[in-house]
Amino acid sequence: MPERYGPWETAAGRHRRWCIDGTWQRIADRLRIDASSGEELIASVDSTTVRAHSHAAGAAKKGTRSGTNRTGSKHSGAPGAG
């Protein structure tokens, strides 16, 4: 996240508060009204344009072997686990 937004905890907290208090809904409602005609506009977000950071996608870290957990074992050690 860009530094200008401050710590991620601040942005996450603000996002959560705005979800709960209806701020995002009010913004979306205002954006759906065409300023020139006053008619409601239809907007959508195509998921092909939304990307997660590589860490969120489960990409392997540099210098680590794929298929291992942090302890380096290939399985959980639980009975029946492979």
Image (cartoon, rainbow, N blue to C red):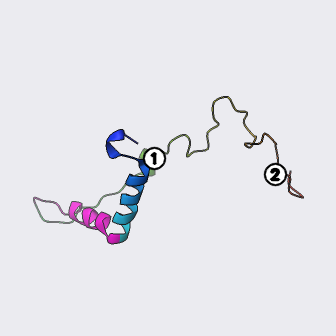
Q: Identify the main secondary structure in magenta.
A: helix
Q: Most extreme residue toward the right, as rendered?
A: 79
Q: Which residues are magenta?
A: 21-36
Left or right of 65? Residue 20 is left
Q: Most extreme residue toward the bottom, as rendered?
A: 21
Mark 1, other Cα within 10 Å: few <14 / some 14–19 / many ≥20: few
Q: Which mark is residue 69?
A: none
Q: Which mark is residue 76?
A: 2
* Residue in front for this viewpoint, 10 or 49: 10
The residue positioned 31% from the left and 70% from the top of the image is 22
Q: Which mark is residue 48?
A: 1
Q: Most extreme residue toward the left, as rendered?
A: 36
Callout 2 secondary element = loop
Q: Earlier in the sequence, mark 2 or mark 1?
A: 1
Left or right of 19? Residue 34 is left
Identify whether 39 is placed above or below 53.
below
Q: Give how far across and how far down residue 56 sits, in percent.
A: 55, 46
The residue positioned 49% from the left and 45% from the top of the image is 52
Callout 1 secondary element = helix
